[in-house]
Image: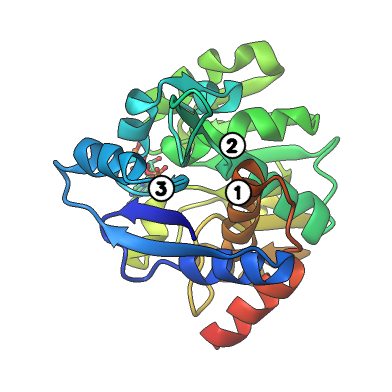
Amino acid sequence: MDKYAVFGNPIKQSKSPAIHTAFAGQCDHRLQYRAVRVEEDDFERATRAFFSEGGRGLNVTVPFKQEAFALADRLSDRARRAGAVNTLSVAEDGAIEGDNTDGVGIVRDMVANLGWMVQGMRVLIIGAGGAVRGVLAPLMRERPKSLLVVNRTAARATQLAEEFSDLGAIEGGGYDLIDERQFDLVINASSAGLSGEAPDLPAGLLTEHSCCYDMVYGNEPTPFMRWAAHHAAWAVADGLGMLVEQAAESFYIWRRVRPETQSVISELRLAME
Ligand code: ATR
């Protein structure tokens, strides 16, 4: 049976085995997919051992995405842009290939699942870490009207905007750049909410048509989602769909079949209630 796994630390809560098992069932593929906790200094050894023992593909999650980027023999353009790899596979010549499906995942969730038309939108992204780096290129491909990245550490956002400036109008800096502007789509990619903090955002940021997306998900609405609902956002979503969509893209890379995602998202959502 073909072997796949996700490597991360921590990994206990990972939904990837359930997602890939559901995809395999749909497509009638026989495969095994496990979640493996890898010690922080053991990623390279564990990865090479996995592939030399016949493993077919790996997902890579926190904190190993940069290490996977460094380890890959070949990189897709989107992985190179992201500076991070979440999907590894082994090519016919034995080379390890690195890709990044996170950015495609969020865009597919917003556009195909939620029906949000990113094209022509004024987009605000909060945060400037690895997650944002992966998302900028696929997002710009949807041709938003403008894109502003704001971050607690302003310099990181400024640098990201500079690095991706060839893709179109991207601005970056501190929260002060929001000023009195309004946005049609606000994406939270800061990890502030993980500690239960609501973001410190101006109340006038949203219009009655604004969509708000939190890359994080949980059993309950995140602080950002609560903020958005409180300020009467038109639509609010968490990152569960992104998780399933990035997995579907990885599955496609490995198996050349694109699984159906809506039913898997619904099942996960039900299981979380
Ligand atoms: P990820 O891979 O999820 O993007 P990361 O690279 O560690 O993780 O980035 C975390 C992001 O959350 C950063 O933008 C970080 O801001 P800084 O660059 O200033 O560190 C942001 N963040 C984390 N805690 C925060 C907080 N309490 N308030 C505001 N932003 C926060």
Residue 12 screen position, x and y as percent? 31, 70
Label 2 close to label 1 by CB (< 8 Å): yes
Q: Quadrant of the C terminus?
A: bottom right
What residue sits 56% from the left and 58% below the top? 243
Q: Is residue 236 above or below residue 131?
A: below
Q: Nearer the viewer, mark 2 or mark 3?
A: 3
- Which quarter holds ligand 1? top left
Residue 131 screen position, x and y as percent? 48, 41
- Closest to the observer, 27 or 268: 27
- Closest to the observer, 18 or 194: 18
Residue type indicated by callout 1: Ile
Residue 196 screen position, x and y as percent? 36, 68
Q: Secondary structure at mark 3?
A: loop
The residue under label 1 is: 187
Q: Earlier in the sequence, mark 2 or mark 3?
A: 3
The residue under label 2 is: 135
Could you say which disc has been placed on residue 27 in the image?
none
The verdict on label 2 being within 8 Å of ligand 1 is: no
Could you say which disc has been placed on residue 55 in the image?
3
Q: Nearer the viewer, mark 1 or mark 3?
A: 3
Q: Callout 2: few (<14), some (14-19), or many (20+) C-alpha neighbours within 10 Å?
A: many
What residue sits 32% from the left and 46% below the top? 53
Q: Is residue 42 left or right of residue 165?
A: left
Q: Callout 3: few (<14), some (14-19), or many (20+) C-alpha neighbours within 10 Å?
A: some
Q: Residue 104 falls in which quadrant of the image?
A: top right
Q: Is residue 2 left or right of residue 34?
A: right
